[in-house]
Image (cartoon, rainbow, N blue to C red):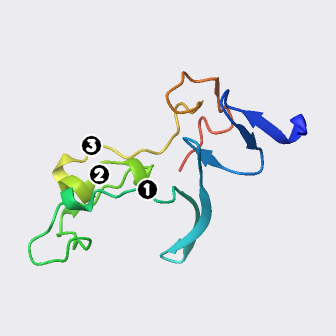
Amino acid sequence: YNSNRYTSNQFIQIPTDQLFYSGIRLLQCQESLGGVVHDILITPNQLDFMSIYYQQPGNPLTEWIVPEGEYFMMGDNRDNSADSRYWGFVPEQNLVGKAIVIWMSFEKQEYQWPTGVRLSRIGRIH
């Protein structure tokens, strides 16, 4: 093989132009929310634990209507986040601030210590 085209995670050779997570090839897609296009990664065959979703009375299991004065919280890694889908909404009086700056961002592989700092992300204001 051409060593310039591959990186190693000590167990398998991974082509540098392909995305993997825990040895599973990720799907790179785009979705549009409110007219804004976002790049997303999907872990194929990832089980979603819908059986423990918060079910709002009167709504189907995977649909929620956010009540006035409350917020739906979604984790930044939505395929692996325990968020409002599981525990419901957050009352506005429980919000104490807004995240606007990235303080720290590490390069790391799952189940390993960070291998570096992603300096290009630190200090970005949203």
On screen, residue 87 versus residue 31, left or right, reads left
Name the residue type under label 3.
Val
Residue 62 visible in image: yes
Give the residue pinned by disc 1.
46
Is the residue 117 above or below the residue 101 in the image? above
User: Could you tell me which quadrant the N terminus lies in?
Assistant: top right
Which badge, 1 or 3, is on the more N-terminal residue?
Answer: 1
Looking at the picture, how far across and down is residue 86, in whole percent? 22, 55
* Residue 14, picture quadrant: top right
Give the residue pinned by disc 2.
83
On screen, residue 57 versus residue 21, left or right, reads left
Image point (41%, 54%), residue name: 78
Residue 89 visible in image: no
Helix, strand or loop for disc 3: loop
Name the residue type under label 1.
Gln
Helix, strand or loop for disc 1: loop
Q: How crowded is the residue under tag 3: few (<14 C-alpha within 10 Å), some, or many (20+)?
A: few
Q: CA distance from mark 3 to mark 2?
A: 17 Å
Q: CA distance from mark 1 to mark 3?
A: 33 Å
Between 46 and 70, the one lying in front of the other is: 46
Name the residue type under label 2.
Asp
Is the residue 8 above or below the residue 83 in the image? above
* Residue 63, picture quadrant: bottom left
Which badge, 3 or 2, is on the more N-terminal residue?
Answer: 2
On screen, residue 111 versus residue 116, left or right, reads left
* Residue 96: image tag: 3
